[in-house]
Each structure stands twice: as structure tokens, then as C-alpha cells.
Image (spheres, helix red, strand yellow):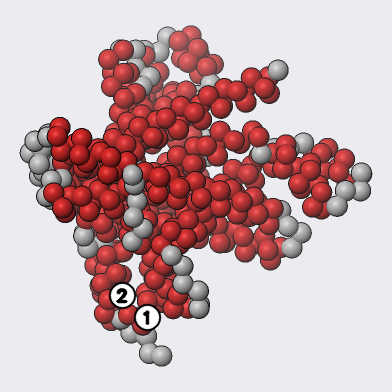
Amino acid sequence: MNVPIGQWLPFLMDGAVVTLRITVFAGLLAFSLSALSGMGRLSALTPIRWISGCYIELFRASSLLVLLFWVYFALPIAGLELSKTWSAVLAIGLNIGAYGGEIVRSSILAVPKGQYEASIALNLRPYTRFIRVVLPQAFVRMLPPMGNLSIEMLKSTSLVYFITMADLTYEAMILRNNYYTHTPIIFGLLLLIYYLMSSCVSWSVRLLERKLACWR
Amino acid sequence: MWDWDYVYELLPKLLRALPATLGAALCGFALAVLVGILIAIAGRSRFRLLRGLTTGIVDFIRSTPLLVQLFFLYYSLPMLTPLAMSAFATGVIGLGLHYACYLSEVFRSSIDALPKGQWEAASALNLSKARTWFSIVLPQAMPPVIPIMGNYLIVIFKETPALSAITFVELLMRTKNETSISFRAFEPYTITGGLFIVVSLLLSLAVSRLEKRFKNRTTA
């Protein structure tokens, strides 16, 4: 049986570019949201703590796919019409950001109390204490779970197939229509591409971890 | 924009699809726990090949999207093998295998945390391998991770809408059908989103109560 993988690759490449673009944009949104909500949850101001808590609880409890449908199909009726890309970025970013917020919060809380006490003893300002002492230590702790979350995010971009965005999964489904008899090979190839992409993410996170944790 | 009459008409229809969603989530969870235990046991096998194979498979399944795995199971398995499964069975197997790989790591760490003396006592008492696992190790390793398992049940529940891709009629699929009948999108999707949030929050409340109970037991 002659398998025309060479003909498929350009389509899969196009899809992979879309998948990566959503991953990067949603990642930027998710990491800003997780930093804001994670630190917000530890804020001294009650309203900020309350808003961050609500955001994290609400979006952690919602199903990403339903959220995506809501943003894409229901939000335009409420007056906010977004393109497919921005709907996907918004839904994935909001959802993953809520999970990230919990990681940020727990990593900051995991910094030993002695570090705070030492900073106070050294008469550092609260701002310096947070930026120079607490955050670098919390950041190293955040890396492994954040790496896992990035892989979760990369995987969740496959859901944009449902709103007919031409990502990797969607391109593979189109190929499947044209080369029906090769269905197992197409899906096998698709799984392999996702696996390679996830491996790249986990590999770079490990590298970063080694670079940043060398002072320990 | 928001029509209450339509909501009253719609809500019972959507609620009727909730059992299918919960059923798929529960069956998937049960399968995930079973297979997860088996993977954790295989990961501690004497045979290096088996250990390497389990780590490889777990790593692969964890790194690829559930949706693509479902497509693979539903559309290519009948072409490769003579067995064709219903959408429900495929969905349960897909969810089960995917989350078994996550749960196996939870079980593995819990088994690793067991004092070494337990294993030594079991071999001193000349217990068989099976007896050691099922009467000594698992009864001690499972209860502490029950709250974590509960969290995975919630995760699985939130992933069930992906089953609509393989034509399983669950809550999201029913919602989609309703929108194509009434041409109204705002109420159905909002209600479905709300239902997912409510059920997840209720489940997580139950899990945190469970957690508190287990904490009391271990300190007592």
C-alpha cells in the first residue's frame, strides 16, 4: 500500500502552525492571568483577594470545551464578536490561567518563613523582599507544575477543532476524508506530531529548570 | 437577549442529558482507577522491559490530546481490528485509558511512600506476590489518595464534552442540537456552562469534605 505522507505534510504543517500560534497566545494570556490571580489571592486587600478567588474557582470548575462554545457561539449574541483565533485564545487562556493561579499561589506560600523573617531582619522594603527574595525561589518551584500545565494547554488546543479552526486535528480530519483508507496512519501520525511537540515543551522546561535551579 | 420562558422549556431537556454525561464520567473513572492500579503494579515489575514499556506508554498517552486518542479509537480501531465499539464504550475506554496514566502516577507515589518494613514483613510472612499487593500494599496505599482520585473524577467529568466528537450524545451535543432547532445560542450554552460549573463545584465540595475526614483519621 502506497502511503502519500509527502502530500500530507504541507497540510499538517499549516495545522501545526495554527496550533502553535494558539498555544503561544493562549500561553501569554494564561501566564499573565495566573501571575495576577495567584498573587492577587495573597493580596492584603480583601476585594483583590475576593476577585482572584472567584476567578480561579469559577474557571477551574468550568469545562474548557463548553467555555469555548460559549465564547464562540453565545458571546456574539451578548455583543462581543471575536474571531475564531481570539475565541480560542480567550477560552484556553482563561481556563489554563485559573489552574496556573493555584500553582503561583502555592509556590509563593511554599517559600520558607525564615526567608521572610530574614528579609525583615535585613530591613528590606516589602517590594524588594518580594522581587529579590521570595519570587526567585517561588519561580523555581513553579517550573515543574507550569511545565505540565503547558503540555495540558498544548493538548487542549486540539479542542479548537470543534469551532472549525484549521488546527492540526482539523487538518488531519480533512486528510482523513480524502484518504479514507489510510485513517489509522493519519491518526497515528497526528498522535506522533503531538507527542513530539509536547516533548519539546517538557524538554525546554527541564533545561530552564536546570539553569535556574543551579544556585540551589 | 435572555428569555425565561425559553429557559423553562429548555432546562428539562438539557437535564435529561446530564445522566449520560455523569454515566460516561463515572464509568471512565472506574476504568481509570482499575487500569491505573495495574499500571502502577506493572511499573514496579521485576522485568526491565515491562517497566520501560509502561513508562513509555504512560508518557505517550499523557503527551497527546484526549480528542485525538478518541478519534483514533473510534475511527481507526475498527479498520485495524475486527472489533467495532459503540460511541459510549469508546468514550469510556478513551477517558479511562487517558486518566489511568495520570492516576498511575498518583498511585505510584503513594505506593513508594509506604514504609519499606511493610514489604519486608510481607516477605517474612511468606505471602505470595498477589497477597502482598492486595492484602498489604493496596489497602494502605489507596485510602490516602482518595481525595486526589476525587479531583480526577471532576477532571474527567469536565472532559466528557469531548465525547460529542465521536457522536456520543451528552450534554454538549444535546445543547448543540437544541441551538440548531431554536436558533438561539445564548441561553443553551449559558445553561450548559452553568450546569458544568454547579456539578463541578458540588463534587469538589464533596471531595474537600472527604479530605477533611481523612485528615482527621490519620492524625487520630
Q: Residue at x 22, y 41 (%)?
A: B10
Q: Is residue A188 visible?
A: yes
Q: Which residue is mark 1?
A: A182
**Which percent across, then down, holds residue B36?**
60, 51
Q: Mark 1 touching mark 2, by CB under 8 A? A: yes
Q: Position of residue A94 (x, y in %)?
A: 28, 38
Are the residues under badges 1 and 2 in a single subunit? Answer: yes
Give the x, y percent position of residue A71: 20, 43
Q: Quadrant of the N terminus of chain B?
A: top left
Task: Give x and y (percent) for residue B72.
Answer: 42, 68
Judge the density around disc 2: few (<14), some (14-19), many (≥20) Cα neighbours within 10 Å.
Answer: some
- Residue B153 as seen in the image, left or right of residue A92: right
Residue type (three-letter) at the residue carrying disc 2: Arg
Report if residue A90 is visible in the image: no
Label number found at residue B120:
none
Q: Which residue is mark 2?
A: A176
Q: Which residue occupies the foreground of this view, A48 or B76?
A: B76
> Quick one: B157 or A168, which is closer to the camera?
B157
Residue at 36% across, 58% down: B168
The residues tagged by marks 1 and 2 sit, at their Cα atoms, a distance apart of: 7 Å
Task: List the single residue furthest toward the bottom.
Answer: A1
In this picture, residue B163 sits left or right of residue B14: right
Disc 2: host chain: A
